Amino acid sequence: MLKHLPILSILLFLFVKLAAQPLPVNSDSLLAIAMNDHKPDSLRLGSMEVIVSTWMMMNPDSCLHYAKLYATLATKLKNNDQLANAQYLQGVSHYFKGDLPEAITALHKSLDTRGENGDPVGRGAALNVIGAVYMLQGNHARAIDNYMRCLKLSEQINDDRGVSGSHFNIGRIYTQQKDYATALEHFKTSLAHKDSADLEGRAKVYQIMATTYVDLKNDVMAKVYFQKALELEITSNDHLGMGMSYSNMATYYLTGKNPDTAIYYAEQSIREFEMVDDVLGIGFACATLAEAFKLKGQHRNAIEHAEKAMAIAKQFNETKLIQETAKILSDNYRAIGQMDKALEMYDLNIMLKDSLQSEENQRGVLRQEYAYQYEKEALSDSLQFAKKEAVLTEQTQKQRIGLGATAIVLLLIILLASSIYKGKKRSDELLLNILPEQVAEELKRNGEAQARQINEVTVLFTDFKDFTAISEKLTPKELVRNLHECFTAFDNIIQKHGLEKIKTIGDAYMAAGGLPAPNETHAHDTVAAAFDILDFINTFNDQKIASGQPYFEIRIGVHTGPVVAGIVGVKKFSYDIWGDTVNTASRIESAGDAGHVNISQATYEIIKHDPQFVFESRGKIVAKGKGEMEMYFARLNT
């Protein structure tokens, strides 16, 4: 069964230069500035850099065009630092387009422009992407060489992030070479240099360590690291990571002939992938479900899920998934007597299996040719070269019989095109998962998203009463699982009512209505969502009480007023809101009672005639830092 591998972070330095570059302060878009011949060249240069760096993965064709203009302008100004950066960005644009030879050429130009003693961050960036290109080509020797050079630069400037990423990438190559012991050493070193606050990054290292232990057939250690990854992903609310962990754990239990547990984790995986619209991830999980139902003898259930997996696999032209799903369908159709369909799927399975084996053989020949050429250069001055050359040439020629060079090139182009398309789609999905759609589109279009004053927004805060005391009664795993269940339900409720989730802080949850696009129903929508949250918690608590477990009592506060909304951060974008309205909403929540929706005077004035709600005046209540405030308990009008 297919494994869901973690996303490989190959462009560790992609936005380093961008982060250090101040954005031009101008009402015009960055593009308008960059293309305006009447603007100062230095301002145009900075604008072009930001455009190319920001849009790189979203529109590589346009970015390549502007990267060339950027290089021309940098040459005109005799600015070698900017020219090297422009050449680097051209190389990355070619990488995302799948033009791998052109990528290497541009990246080497960037290295030459910087020189041996040039900017170590810029040189490390170029070496890192060169390593990624060679890795895609199957040229493992050159990939490792470039990653090692990148590693040395990171060590020289004490860049733990770069050191961690380089070890991760090197370890990934060793897993492809099936040198699992060496791979694990690099993964452990990567983990040692990973920032303890980078939960998602640490989780991805745990993920790949777990899959490596699966390959080593060390079930005990595989389970340990799958669980470590999952716990971090739950803590960081990383739905994509959770989907991958659950999918890998389902495969793990399926391999161990434990179909019931495999079904549980596969269903969890589908739920998480649905949260981020990862259709291909859902396809992998459906295939695992189908295989598990087949083991249980539930053939019609197996066929239902395998057909879903097949439709998704064909949508994405995922050959390996099509092949494995065809085998599952063939077995299950035969089990229920549908022999025509069974034979059709059997033929498809065999055809694709042969094709994939041929593809792997071709990749193996390419890898050996690359390794040979690399060693040839390294031994060019050695007296032993002639002897080695004769042996390796004979081996290579034997393996190349029947293989056409044109077929190999076409195959790699097809594989790369599929990889680039899926990478671009994934980057769009991830951007929409952390930013409102309107804000994400503005960021992609202009290279930035302006902060905005919104005159009337309704903010909702929740937290759990006596959370610290309750947490002491639960194991860390139980605590995180309970929070995850609650916050996932809250996310669904917020989405249902058209609100925007802002963030979670510990056991507190914050959302708002009326943004990023203002509307007239924000107060009603937010209070209605508050009652759905309260209803969920009541049901959740009934289940906990019935089983004798600790339960959560929730306070909910709602306030309306103006806010400033915008994006913060450069390494991780985050959509946030600021202003006294936010602070007041937090105080309204703190001054409430568990099991009630406490609203401010401002919110009450907007919805006081709403027939869906009734209100109980609480009079003036002291709120910390705010003094006395009019507050009301809102209730549903039954």
Image (tube, rainbow, N blue to C red):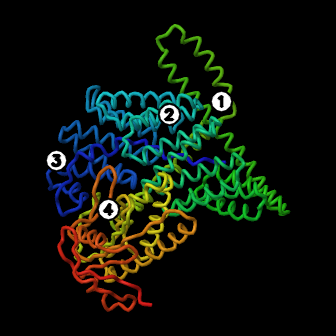
| Discs 1/4, front | 4
Q: Are marks 4 and 3 in contact (CB under 8 Å)?
A: no
Kindly report the distance in space between the C-alpha atoms of the residues bearing marks 1 and 4: 54 Å
Residue underneath mark 4: 575
Task: Give the image location of residue 337, x and y in percent.
Answer: 85, 63
Q: Is residue 139 visible?
A: no
Separation of residues labelled 4 and 3 (CA atoms): 30 Å
**Which mark, by number, is residue 42?**
3
* Type of amino acid at the residue the image marks with label 2: Gly
User: Upstream in the sequence, badge 3 or badge 1?
Assistant: 3
Q: What residue type is labelled 1?
A: Arg
* In the depicted structure, whether residue 463 falls above or below residue 364: below
Residue 171 disc label? 2
On screen, residue 365 versus residue 258, left or right, reads left
The disc labelled 4 sits on which kind of residue? Tyr
Q: Which amino acid does label 3 sit on?
A: Ser
Q: Earlier in the sequence, mark 4 or mark 3?
A: 3
Pick whichever of labels 2 and 1 is earlier in the sequence.
2
Task: Name above or below for residue 240 compared with residue 500.
Answer: above
Mark 2 or 1, which is nearer the eye?
Answer: 2
Label 1: state its secondary structure. Answer: helix
